[in-house]
């Protein structure tokens, strides 16, 4: 009895589909930079991942009560995007959330966030020469203070070596 190959018998057919990336700088954007600085003081350990930056939090920041109103604000924004731009009503929950502080020379290697449904980047604070987030090797989203980016989690993205500082929140959402 040999090893079972679960892919045997499957033909793989590639399809091309345009996937949207939504960006906005909302008027009601919360100032969470003080919360992030406080969280970093309390959790100074840097968590190594595909993000090679000055400091990265653990994966479960969404469980910190201080971020509750921010999390609700993000979930509301994602529901709005689905309702008014994708013509569907969806309820999301935050699967994980982490904070990052990039300094000169920091970067993130290409990656995606599959199997989650949606992913979010929120630029809390950044210098003018902060590196953009590059999606699928070609679409660049330039960081701006309070810019919110919502995108399908399967999109590959990276941050090339930055010159300027970037403070970001990232999260993955599940559909429930």
Image: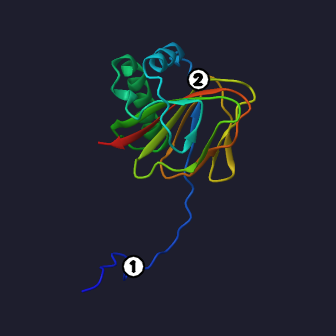
| Residue positioned 43% across, 22% down in the render | 43
Q: Nearer the viewer, residue 92 or 168?
A: 168
Name the quarter where the N terminus is drawn: bottom left
The numbered disc on residue 10 is 1
> Which residue is outermost to the left?
1
x then y, percent, for residue 105: 70, 35
> Label 2 vs label 1: CA separation?
45 Å
Q: x, y (%) of residue 111?
A: 54, 50
Residue that sits furthest to the front in the current view: 45
Is disc 2 surrounded by few (<14), some (14 to 19) or many (20+) residues within 10 Å? Answer: many
| Residue located farthest toward the bottom when viewing the structure as drawn | 1
State the residue at coordinates (37%, 81%): 8
Label at residue 76? none
**Front-lying residue, 106 or 97:** 106
- Disc on res. 146: 2
Where is residue 92? Give x, y as percent.
35, 37
């Amino acid at each position: 009895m040999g090893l079972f190959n679960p892919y045997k018998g499957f033909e793989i057919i590639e399809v091309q589909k345009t996937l949207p990336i939504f960006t906005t700088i909302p008027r009601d954007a919360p100032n969470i930079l003080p919360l992030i600085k406080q969280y970093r003081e309390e959790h100074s350990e840097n968590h190594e991942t595909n993000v090679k930056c000055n400091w990265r939090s653990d994966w479960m920041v969404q469980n910190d009560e201080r971020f509750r109103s921010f999390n609700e604000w993000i979930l509301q924004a994602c529901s709005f995007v689905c309702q008014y731009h994708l013509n569907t009503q969806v309820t999301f929950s935050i699967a994980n959330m982490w904070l990052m502080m990039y300094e000169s020379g920091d970067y993130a290697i290409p990656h995606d966030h599959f199997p989650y449904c949606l992913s979010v980047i929120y630029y809390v604070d950044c210098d003018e020469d902060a590196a953009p987030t590059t999606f699928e090797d070609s679409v660049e989203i330039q960081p701006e203070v309070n810019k919110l980016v919502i995108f399908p989690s399967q999109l590959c993205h990276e941050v090339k070596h930055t010159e300027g500082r970037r403070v970001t929140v990232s999260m993955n959402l599940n559909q429930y």
